Amino acid sequence: MTQKHQQQIRRSQDLLPERKTESQRKKTRMAGDLYALDFDGVLCDSCGESSLSAVKAAKIRWPSLFDGVDSSLEEWIVDQMHILRPVVETGYENLLLVRLLLELQMPSIRKSSVADGLTIEAILNNWSQLKPIIMKEWNEDRDALIDLFGRVRDNWMQTDLSGWIGANRFYPGTGDALRFASSQVYIVTTKQSRFADALLRELAGVTIPSEKIYGLGTGPKVEVLKKLQAMPEHEGLTLHFVEDRLATLKNVIKEPALDRWNLYLGRWGYNTEKEREEAQSFSRIHMLDLPDFCKKLK
Ligand SMILES: [Mg+2]
């Protein structure tokens, strides 16, 4: 090897980028993640609370329908609500489900034929078609129901805070994962922000700044994700969105502008076996188990 060659090799070695240690690499990578997290069905199991709130609200909205409804029928309704939970996108729909379940059991209170021949299975499979029909047949207004549902929860919180909080639970490990998260964490939920905030504080012992909680009224989730990715301070971060509702992830996939998001369907949340199977046919969607989710956040 000539001296010239040796000089060339030495020079090219000098140009090699400094090699990072494994811990440095990990640090860079961990600092570079942003997680947008759904709340209900990802962090918090609120099904007991939302079903009980819905029964309370339904009694206010349609008092006469509850004449002759005993506690065992109410319990049956709350039980069925756990099965139907995967169809609920926004809280007020729980009220509609409560009334529909009541009509299934008590044909005499039906004001329309919508509940005739209906089964739990059929509600589970056709909710998106059923919902606009019953809203029209029952002459209901979405905003009024959202408002009523919010007021019933507020009232429950004000009169019996520990009872209200106790009707919710965080999925095991999620509280610690949030507390020790090294990534940027945002909550993107259709729940009203003040409820998510109260539960995070009281049950998980975590305070997430209000500007990092996008709740009901902040626009569809796809728009929130666009907003998050456009923020200058998020430039260069790897983006992750964790949801338990397949329909929401499908909406994200439809948006070419959201191509950069890594999408996850949490198996532990409110989705059906059928939806989990369907999710696996989308290459964009990663199936996630609860322990892996908690590890990822930390
Ligand atoms: Mg959810």
Image: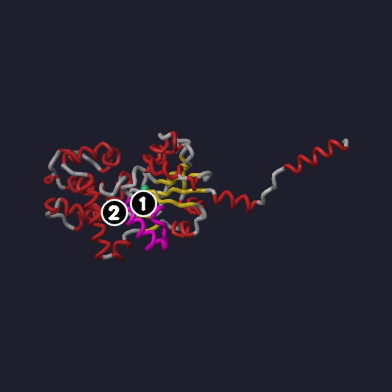
Q: Which residue is mark 2?
A: 50
Q: Disc 2, disc 1: CB below 8 Å?
A: yes
Q: Residue at x 48, y 36 (%)?
A: 283
The quadrant in which residue 15 appears is top right
Q: Which residue is mark 1?
A: 40
Q: Which quadrant would the N terminus be assigned to in this image?
A: top right
101 and 9: which one is in front? 9
Mark 1 residue type: Asp
* Disc with the residue nearer the chain's start (2 vs 1): 1
Mark 2 residue type: Ser
165 and 19: which one is in front? 19
Position of residue 80 measured from the top left corner of the image (x, y, whole percent): 27, 49
* Mark 2: secondary structure: helix
Check mark 1 vs ligand 1: CB closer than 8 Å? yes or no.
yes
* Mark 1: secondary structure: loop
Task: Please report the bounds of the magenta region as a residue range.
Answer: 191-214
Position of residue 65 measured from the top left corner of the image (x, y, whole percent): 13, 50
Label 2 Cα crowd, 10 Å radius (few <14 / some 14-19 / many 20+): many
Q: Residue at x 17, y 54 (%)?
A: 60
Position of residue 171 measured from the top left corner of the image (x, y, whole percent): 41, 56
